[in-house]
């Protein structure tokens, strides 16, 4: 197998996975609009494309399967087959299979996927419908058109120009690999640093023109940086569409009638964040359908419409992205939660909780209110995983509950993970560290009088009558620092409603920094979440105060 | 008080006192006399005038009586009548005149009451007379008869008039009496007063005259006494002067000779000083030439130091060269740096070339070649820097040694210079001292000159002294003569004062007792004489006298 | 993929290019293709809780890269970073690592004939990272497998240290 062939295959697989995403969206739309010929044409074109390309690059099995599917689509297009839920179901299952198939092939181009059963199902449906199309012999992708030109060629020739024009209209974007974007962002970051150096040396140049140029260069550099950051932004609609599917499957399985309302799907989000957002969302949607929405009879009993509603919306709020998952189900029952918690040993037998505190119980590990373990939810790994994932994304999850009327989860996410607002602090004269501003609650300048010894080694920090455990960052990091003796600063950070104080020598500045992942050799260093490059071009570590506090207090 | 007055004042005072008394007496008499005159005048002018006027009026009225008488029982012709008329008019005018005269004299108390009835009755009388005269103008007998009858009633008019007139007359005579009596008394009192005053004045004047003359005489006597004793003193003093003068003259001669001796020794001193000064000048000249030599020496040394310094400067230049060498070394470091970087570049180029695989092969060779070249130039640079280091060391060593030597040389030269400087200072000191000696000698010779001049002056003065003493001897002679003359004058004065007899007695014993009158007077002159004698040497303060004294002591 | 092919091509011809560097007085080599680039000593930010031979992190044109003092790591020689000290950036399939060496000397193409097997020695020290020796100009060059010398061992070391501490 030569290189060129490999490359061809890789390109095909990449394309195909994108096409499948588009297809899934079309299938879902088709269910609600069975007579939308445009949609059917689109689907047909996609299938045809994949079939052709698959045969061309040598994925014969894939081509074969696609051929059968294409025939089915053709019947739909010719109105020989009526679109209904089972048909769409088949389509979706095919889509799922193809997605898995393509993914498998990307890893190993010779891998096999068990597709036979689904192929049989498709054939069954195909056979059940009287076809005007002649039976096709399938040798390879090109054979279709050679052996059987009249109808399919006609169909193809009809379809292709149509879709070509649609594609031109629709697809005004280009696909760029993330590494390229990251490379660009890196380079631009470097450019910004160089520009900063240039700006600092500006006064050495006497020519006003050069000075002005440097200023303008600075502005443009910032703009470029902003735009480059925007390159990582991906709209949410794909993810949201996936949710529609999840909702449909789940509700069907549970025998519930649920309608999903999507809003704000065009909102952009950093690719990295988005990639890690899928699982939590799936959990939350399933949770809403499974636990929130009642069965239709129940709903009617309490005077609600038989059809339940789930709202999935995204919007910006004060520099953060908010994703809201709301249902009009039964809501959380505080008493029930407490009871279960006590039963599971999550909560002590004699504990009493406020309602709001009780709601938070659902985020505890190993907590599930459903008495039966289903494959949908209730495995007890749901919401605590969700919360952990969100926190990993530097986000936050909030819960709003109206018993009897529904629950609302709100996820607050940073727009990007690549840039954070950081506070640059100094230990001794030269060393600089970055602390994420989100972890800084308050900063105090101290002269030493506010610090008190506590025990043999530990110290506490007195502020406004509160006594907080104090960690000297110098000591924690094993670096020389003079904050213990001389005046310095104390950063108060809030972790899990607890406050901790961290002593450093000084606060240098506050700025946005681009997060650089540390090499794998350093990934797990405790108390360090990453690195950043400061204005002077030096690399600096980004501290994770939370981790430091945890590591110390543990 | 009176004694303190001068003689003139005393005399004038005495005479003025007498004159005052005289004037006082005269004044009193005059006022008294005036009073008397006034009273008599009053009598004459007022009383007598009134009386005369009254008499005149009476006379006129009497004429009226006559006229009436004439008219009665007569028949007058026109001429007669005219005569009568004239008569009447005359009488009337006389009455008027009398009245006027009377009225002209001022009235006294009570006079008016007396005068009024007179006047009224007089007017009636006049009226009556005028009527009678009118009635007389007819030739009618009846009328005439009537007139006659009327004329017979004249007495009714005349009698009251006559009584009034008498009373007035009496009053007037009484007045006159009163005034004349007072005049008499005034006159007699004045006489008594004047007489007594004159008596008092005469007595006072006499006493005063006596007192004054006595006091003046006393003083004059005392003065003349003193004069005569003074003359005695002068005489004796003059004789003393004459003897002293002789002594003086002798010592002056002696002085002159000793002066001569002094002058000669001073001249000798002067010549010695001159010699001294010449020597000092010569030594000063010698010192100056010594200084010049030292200066020359110093100049030479400073030249030497300059030379040393220039060697030092040369050394510094050499150290500049060392610096340049250091800079070169630095540059070779830059070269080193460049070499290092070039090497890195060549490695990176090799890396890239290796990446490029077959295509990069040729480039890899180039990169290696560049690396080798860099290595070579690096080695060369290292060699250069080694060589530079060596030469640097050598040059630095050279500089240090030469620097040390130059330093030693400079030190020696400096010390030499210091010694010469000291020498210059000492020679300068010597020179200065010689100069000082010379100037001191000059000062001395000037002093000697002054002494010589003073000697000459002294000599002259001595000679003058001698002649002056002779002069004073002759003057003493003259003085005693003058004293004699003075005594004669004093005698004369005494004569004038005391009278010839007493003076003559005094004059006859001029050297015996000066004042024979009283014991007190006798003692006074001796005291005076003692005083004078004591005073004589002290009061002599003229130059000749001082010399005289000085020489006296010296002799 | 293509790079591995070209390496193969070179190997076939028997001359593989090596970057020769010095650690103290000894000469070592790494395959030139493992080298990303060679740079001067950059500004290095120290990282807490790391072994002494771990110098820290640096900024290589926007990429944060760890630097290890190979002199200290392999020779246990504490040497100051100086002007002549060079840092070789190695590329292990996209993961970059810098190593500080005493000096980078030259690039050599070593034929297979020149490369000898590592002499087996009775020693407790693990010398697996030396893949072979070569003689050139009467000098011995030790062929180094840096991924063995550093990667496996070091990364694990850091990992375990941290996880132990965190635990």
Image: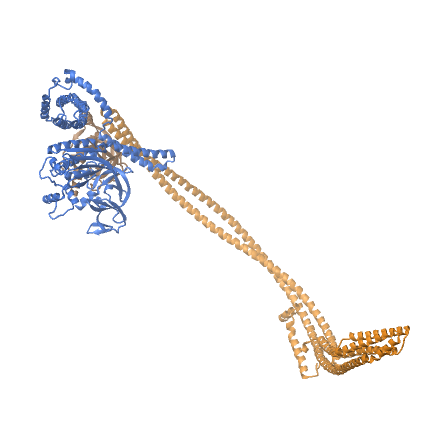
> x, y percentage for residue B2?
68, 78
Could you say which is closer to the camera, residue B508 or residue B89? B89
Quadrant housing the N terminus of chain C: top left
Q: Nearer the viewer, residue B285 or B203?
A: B203
Looking at the figure, which quarter contains the C terminus of chain C?
A: top left
Q: How is the image coloured?
A: by chain
Give the total of numbered labels: 0
Picture quadrant where residue A430 is located: top left
Residue B481 percent location from the top left of the image: 73, 74
Task: Give the residue at x 49% y 53%.
Answer: B426
- Residue B184, quarter of picture: bottom right
For the residue pair B354 and A331, the one nearer the viewer reads as A331
State the image coordinates of residue A204 (x, y, percent, origin top left).
36, 37
Is residue B344 in view?
yes
**Chain letter tied to blue:** A
Residue placed most toward the observer, A379 or A59: A379
Q: Can residue B378 be seen in this view?
A: no
Depicted A323 relative to depicted B165: above or below: above
| Residue C52, horizontal then vertical, whole percent | 21, 41
Q: Is residue B131 left or right of residue A297?
A: right
In the figure, the shade used to draw chain B is orange
Compared with B276, A335 (above or below) is above
Q: Is residue B88 above or below residue A218?
A: below
Q: Colour of chain C?
A: brown
Q: Which residue is most to the front?
A: B142
Q: In this view, does A339 lie to the left or right of A528?
A: left
């Amino acid at each position: 197998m030569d290189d060129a062939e490999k490359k061809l295959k890789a390109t095909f697989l990449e394309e195909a996975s994108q096409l499948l995403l588009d297809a899934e969206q079309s299938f879902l739309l088709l269910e609600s609009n069975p007579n939308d010929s445009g949609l059917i044409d689109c689907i047909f074109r996609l299938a045809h494309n994949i079939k052709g390309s698959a045969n061309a690059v040598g994925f014969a099995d894939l081509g074969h399967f696609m051929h059968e599917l294409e025939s089915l689509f053709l019947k739909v297009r010719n109105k020989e087959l009526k679109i209904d839920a089972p048909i769409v179901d088949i389509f979706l299952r095919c889509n799922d299979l193809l997605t898995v198939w393509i993914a498998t092939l990307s890893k190993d181009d010779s891998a096999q996927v068990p597709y036979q059963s689904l192929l049989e199902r498709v054939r069954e449906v195909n056979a059940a419908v009287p076809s005007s199309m002649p039976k096709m012999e399938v040798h390879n992708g090109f054979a279709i058109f050679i052996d059987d030109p009249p109808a399919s060629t006609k169909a193809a020739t009809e379809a292709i120009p149509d879709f070509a024009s649609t594609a031109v209209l629709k697809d005004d974007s280009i696909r760029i690999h993330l590494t390229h974007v990251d490379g660009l962002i890196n380079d631009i970051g470097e450019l910004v640093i160089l520009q900063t150096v240039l700006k600092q040396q500006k006064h050495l140049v006497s020519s006003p023109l050069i000075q002005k140029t440097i200023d303008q260069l600075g502005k443009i550099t910032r703009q470029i940086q902003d735009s480059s950051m925007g390159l990582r932004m991906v709209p949410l609609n794909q993810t949201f569409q996936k949710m529609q599917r999840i909702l449909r499957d789940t509700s069907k399985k549970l025998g519930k009638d649920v309608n999903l309302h999507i809003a704000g799907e065009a909102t952009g989000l950093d690719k990295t964040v988005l990639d890690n957002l899928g699982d939590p969302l799936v959990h939350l949607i399933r949770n809403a359908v499974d636990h929130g929405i009642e069965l239709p009879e129940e709903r009617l009993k309490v005077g609600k419409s038989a059809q339940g509603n789930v709202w999935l919306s995204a919007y910006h709020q004060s520099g953060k992205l908010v994703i809201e998952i709301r249902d009009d189900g039964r809501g959380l029952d505080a008493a029930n939660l407490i009871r279960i918690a006590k039963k599971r040993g999550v909560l002590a037998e004699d504990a009493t909780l406020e309602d709001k505190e009780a709601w938070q119980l659902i985020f505890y590990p190993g907590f599930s209110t459903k008495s039966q373990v289903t494959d949908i939810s209730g495995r007890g790994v749901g919401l605590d995983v969700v919360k952990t994932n969100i926190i990993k994304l530097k986000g936050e999850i909030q819960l709003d509950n109206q018993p009897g009327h529904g629950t609302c989860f709100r996820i607050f996410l940073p727009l990007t993970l690549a840039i954070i607002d950081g506070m640059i602090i100094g230990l001794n004269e030269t060393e600089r560290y970055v602390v994420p501003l989100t972890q800084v609650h308050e900063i105090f300048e101290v002269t030493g009088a506010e610090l008190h010894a506590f025990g043999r080694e530990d110290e506490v920090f007195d502020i406004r009558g509160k006594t907080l455990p104090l960690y000297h960052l110098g000591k924690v990091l094993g670096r020389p620092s003079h904050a213990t003796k001389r005046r310095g600063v104390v950063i108060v950070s809030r972790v899990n409603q607890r406050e901790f104080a961290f002593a450093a020598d000084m606060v240098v500045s506050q700025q946005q920094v681009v997060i650089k992942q540390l090499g794998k050799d350093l990934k797990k260093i405790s108390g360090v979440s990453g690195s950043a490059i400061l204005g002077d071009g030096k690399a600096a570590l980004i501290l994770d105060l939370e981790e430091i506090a945890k590591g110390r207090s543990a | 008080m009176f004694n303190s007055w001068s003689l003139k004042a005393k005399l004038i005072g005495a005479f003025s006192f007498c004159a005052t008394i005289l004037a006082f007496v005269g004044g009193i008499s005059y006022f008294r006399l005036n009073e008397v005159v006034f009273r008599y005048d009053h009598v004459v002018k007022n009383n007598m005038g009134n009386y005369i006027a009254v008499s005149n009026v009476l006379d006129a009225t009497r004429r009226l009586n006559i006229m009436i008488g004439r008219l009665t029982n007569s028949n007058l012709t026109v001429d007669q009548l005219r005569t009568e008329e004239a008569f009447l008019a005359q009488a009337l005018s006389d009455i008027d005149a009398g009245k006027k005269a009377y009225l002209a004299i001022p009235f006294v108390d009570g006079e008016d009451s007396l005068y009024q009835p007179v006047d009224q009755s007089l007017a009636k009388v006049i009226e009556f007379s005028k009527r009678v005269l009118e009635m007389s103008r007819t030739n009618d007998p009846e009328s005439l008869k009537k007139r006659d009858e009327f004329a017979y009633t004249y007495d009714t008019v005349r009698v009251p008039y006559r009584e009034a007139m008498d009373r007035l007359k009496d009053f007037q005579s009484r007045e006159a009496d009163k005034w004349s009596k007072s005049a008499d008394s005034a006159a007699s009192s004045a006489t008594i007063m004047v007489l007594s005053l004159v008596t008092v004045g005469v007595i006072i004047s006499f006493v005063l005259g006596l007192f004054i003359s006595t006091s003046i005489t006393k003083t004059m006597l005392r003065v003349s006494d003193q004069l005569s004793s003074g003359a005695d003193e002068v005489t004796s003093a003059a004789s003393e002067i004459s003897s002293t003068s002789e002594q003086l003259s002798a010592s002056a001669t002696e002085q002159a000779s000793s002066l001569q001796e002094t002058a000669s020794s001073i001249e000798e001193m002067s010549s010695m000083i001159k010699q001294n000064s010449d020597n000092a000048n010569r030594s000063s000249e010698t010192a100056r030439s010594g200084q010049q030599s030292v200066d020359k020496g110093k100049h030479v040394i400073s030249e030497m130091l300059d030379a040393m310094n220039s060697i030092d400067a040369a050394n510094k230049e050499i150290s500049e060269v060392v610096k340049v060498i250091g800079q070169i070394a630095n540059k070779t470091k830059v070269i080193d740096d460049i070499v290092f970087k070039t090497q890195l570049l060549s490695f990176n180029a090799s890396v890239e070339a290796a990446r490029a695989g077959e295509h990069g092969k040729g480039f890899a060779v180039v990169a290696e070649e560049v690396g080798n070249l860099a290595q070579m130039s690096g080695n060369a640079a290292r060699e250069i820097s080694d060589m530079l280091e060596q030469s640097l060391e050598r040059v630095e060593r050279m500089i240090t040694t030469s620097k040390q030597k130059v330093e030693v040389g400079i030190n020696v030269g400096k010390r030499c210079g210091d010694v010469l400087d000291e020498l210059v200072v000492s020679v300068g000191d010597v020179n200065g001292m010689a100069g000082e000696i010379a100037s001191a000698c000059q000062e001395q010779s000037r002093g000697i000159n002054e002494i010589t001049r003073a000697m000459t002056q002294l000599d002259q003065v001595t000679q003058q002294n001698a002649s002056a003493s002779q002069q004073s001897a002759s003057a003493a002679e003259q003085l005693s003569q003058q004293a004699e003359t003075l005594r004669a004058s004093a005698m004369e004065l005494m004569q004038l004062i005391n009278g010839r007899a007493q003076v003559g007695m005094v004059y006859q014993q001029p050297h015996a007792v000066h004042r024979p009158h009283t014991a007190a007077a006798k003692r006074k002159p001796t005291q005076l004489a003692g005083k004078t004698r004591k005073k004589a040497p002290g009061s002599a303060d003229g130059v000749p006298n001082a010399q005289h004294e000085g020489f006296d002591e010296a002799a | 993929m293509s790079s591995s092919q070209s390496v193969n091509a070179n190997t076939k011809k028997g001359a593989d290019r090596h970057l020769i560097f010095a650690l103290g007085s000894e000469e070592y080599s790494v395959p030139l293709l493992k080298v990303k680039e060679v740079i001067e000593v950059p500004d290095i930010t120290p990282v807490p809780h790391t072994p002494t031979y771990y110098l820290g992190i640096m900024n290589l044109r926007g990429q944060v890269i760890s630097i290890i003092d190979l002199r200290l790591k392999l020779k246990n020689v504490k040497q100051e970073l100086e002007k002549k000290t060079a840092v070789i950036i190695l590329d292990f399939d996209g993961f970059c690592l810098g190593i500080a060496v005493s000096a980078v000397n030259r690039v050599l193409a070593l034929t297979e004939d020149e490369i000898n097997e590592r002499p087996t020695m009775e020693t407790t020290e693990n010398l697996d990272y030396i893949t072979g020796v070569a003689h050139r100009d009467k000098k011995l060059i030790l062929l180094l497998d840096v991924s063995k010398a550093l990667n496996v061992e070091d990364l694990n070391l850091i990992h375990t240290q941290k996880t132990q501490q965190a635990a």
